[in-house]
Amino acid sequence: MRMSIVSFSRKSTRGTRGSKAGGITGRDGYLVLQAFAYAILTIERLPDEQQEWSNKEQMKILLDLWGRGHSEDFLDNARFHIDRSGRIANALDLHYGN
């Protein structure tokens, strides 16, 4: 099954309240782009020999194409959440001694 680029346009990433016109959830495109951003950053944090380079590079292409110029926004948002959760986990480890 080929996925249409149109289905991931910026317009389709925002459903109206109570509407699922943009797909199954009304936010399908947004969720897929967000998942690409998290996957890309996760792969990049692996040791070089474990990185799936071609998958990462193809995800970057899809994120850029389907994100319609907003790929850095998705990556920045994912970085913020990953870094924040890491800081929270480290603080909990220090506090509770885990």
Image (cartoon, rainbow, N blue to C red):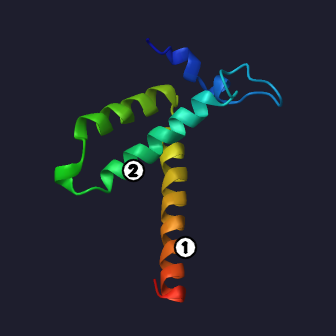
Disc 1 crowd, CA 10 A, few/some/many (<14, 14-19, 20+): few
Residue 88's disc is: 1
- Marks 2 and 1, how far apart at CA: 18 Å
Specify whether residue 70 is in view. no
Task: Identify the secondary structure beneath mark 1.
Answer: helix
Q: Residue 82: percent from the left, percent from the top?
A: 49, 59
Disc 1 marks a residue whose amino acid type is Ile
Identify the mark at residue 41; answer none if there is no mark: 2
The answer to whether residue 36 is above or below residue 41 is: above
Residue at image position (45%, 33%) is 63
Given the image, on which type of amino acid does mark 2 rest? Leu
Decide if residue 34 is on the left or right side of residue 42: right
Q: Nearer the viewer, residue 49 or 60?
A: 49
Q: Is residue 5 left or right of residue 61?
A: right
Q: Quadrant of the C terminus?
A: bottom left
Above or below, comparing residue 92 to residue 15 in the picture: below
| Quadrant in which the N terminus is drawn | top left
| Nearer to me, 59 or 69 | 59
Q: For residue 7, what is the image quadrant?
A: top right
Q: Position of residue 70 (x, y in %)?
A: 53, 37
Residue 6 visible? The answer is yes
Q: Residue furthest front?
A: 98
Foreground mark, 2 or 1?
1
Q: Where is residue 93? Give x, y as percent.
A: 48, 81
Q: Earlier in the sequence, mark 2 or mark 1?
A: 2
